[in-house]
Image (cartoon, coloured by chain):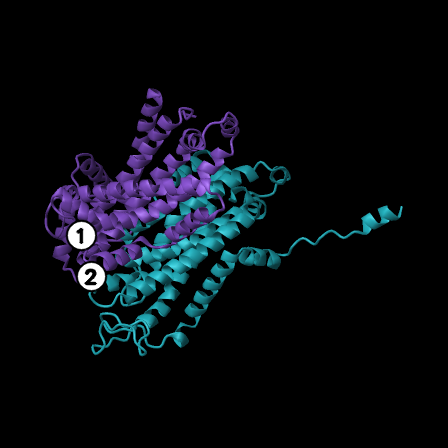
Amino acid sequence: MSIIAEETTRVLPAEPNAFQKVRAVLFGRPETVFATAVIAIFILIALLAPWLAPYDPLAQSILKINRLPSAENWLGTDQFGRDVLSRLIYGSRNSLLFGFISPVLAAIFGTMLGVIAGYFGGIVDRLISRVIDLLLAFPELLLAILIAAVLGGGFWNIIAVITVAFIPGFARVARAQTLSVKQEPYVEAAIAVGVRTPVIIVRHIIPNIMAPIVALMTLWVASAIRIEASLSFLGIGTRAPNPSWGNIIRDGLNSLFGSPWPIIGAGIAITLVVLSFNLVGDAIRDALDPSTAR
Amino acid sequence: MARYLLLRLADAIPTLLLVLTLVFIAMRILPGDPALAALGDAALPEQLAEFRERMGLNVPLWQQYFNFLGGVLTLDFGRSLLSNTPVLTLIAQNLPYTIELTVAAMLMGIVAGIPLGVVAATNRNKTPDTGVRLFSLIGYAIPDFFLGALLLITFALNLGWFPINGAGTDFVSRMHHIFLPALTLAFVKAAFLGRLTRTSLLEVLGKDYVRTARAKGAKENRVIYRHGLRNAMLPISTGLGLSLLSTLSGSVAVELVFNRPGIGRLLIDAIAERDYAVIQGGVLVFAGFVVLINLLMDLVYVVVDPRVRVK
């Protein structure tokens, strides 16, 4: 008797709340602790750029061209005498901004397309799926280069280019998920009691397909940063004289016999940030979408 | 088999048509007036009119579309606005260099990547495995143009072992010129293929027939190569196709780093000079490659895995 009483009063361990889940993901493995720290540092650098940068990133000086690192300019100067460290610090703003904005926009548009295709089916689905399948055949970077070749560089164009390059991936996942969620009894019940279609999509479909979409979004932050850097390196991304890690490397290569430090500094920054977002993205994917976990 | 191949080939036709249509829409409609885009805001009305006439932009859009399709079918991509050279000639001059670079990078990537994956899988969770994992993490993160610049500065500029630009003339000098650019692209390939080989091989090595082979007393090498790797080749061959596509997109930046001729270089230079006809030609070549490589991937799939048939 007493045993039964004891059993019934036993408290089940509390379901971890959102904060605990996020903490488990970000600090779960030693490598993600490192990655989270790197990302936090770079976000701080981007936010505090005006206070951290020792010089104006655009200020040129004929007197100090292609200087090697010194106490005055920690990473030296470029071919226009601009302080490399200040340009790297301001460049982090571009990388992180594009890294966050484009995947979010692509997730919104891609999910819309995928849900429409999956929910309505028929000719709409055939048309959307055909275009998506075609675009999925292109690597994102190549698609971005080809679209940027037509559109040209500049802030809004970069956002548009990276977003369009990512939309097919989101649309495919959203479509597949919608097809399976559509079969669920609660959706059939909603249809049976006459809930209007837009309400079903917003209230019943979208919340139930969000997990893989969010996982994909975090994985693509790293890709977006890489693509922005590549486009800026190719001269079809962030326009000079505005600093971006990609065009700092481009400038560094153009004055190859000057100082190698712009290339080394910007390259390490890109590699570190992309590596960190890859690690965190993997961890979030494993947490949200256990079926694809390693 | 023959039926599948025919069906798959027939399926490539609407795909190509769709690609052409998308390129047409992007080039004619999206950026506003191509004449203004090419000549700049300061262009005189007569210049704009002349440009439209020359590019065939003064006829209705549907007619432009059919002219465009006809041009592509007859391999007439127009002439460069700058040099007046036919775009086809420019493509023919540059394409061999891009193909050469892609093939060299793929070979180097395969030769390094697959053995790395085998070593990682057979030493699971030991030091070699961790090393391969670290290598692939870095390979996934490092931008190819940064790695290329580092190799260029170290081995060409400082040590003088390799030329710093161009593509060379005779065979030996071409191999000499291609080594660093190909190595740059191969590094990323090897990271990707190493990881993929490890995962695929581990999955196969967990299968029942591998246990049976071991139980029969087959030598470990035979188990790994005959029973393991052979069956892991299916996902690896898909990975090779994807890898080929990403090598192609990476070649654009690498050609720029090493100042090599090639299609990517042609495209990027054309963008800088607003050479509309060449941009369109370059975009079409890359898009054509993507369609072609996807088709080849599907065909390889049938050969490697006879179970794959039309659904």
Indicate whether B37 appears above or below B74: below
Q: Residue B184: x, y in percent?
A: 28, 50
Name the quarter where the N terminus of chain B is drawn: top left
Q: Chain of mark 1?
A: B
Q: Which color is chain A depicted in? A: cyan
| Kind of element beneath mark 1 | loop
Q: The residue under label 2 is which amino acid type?
A: Asp
Q: Residue B279: x, y in percent?
A: 21, 49
Query: Pointer 2: residues within 10 angstroms few (<14), some, or many (20+)?
Result: few
In the figure, is residue B28 to the left or right of B44?
A: right
Q: Of all residues shown, which one is farthest toward the top?
A: B2
In the figure, is residue B17 to the left or right of A11?
A: left
Indicate whether A254 appears above or below B200: below
The residue at the point 43 percent across, 26 percent down is B311
Residue tagged 2: B41
Residue tagged 1: B275
Q: Nearer the viewer, residue A185 or A289?
A: A289
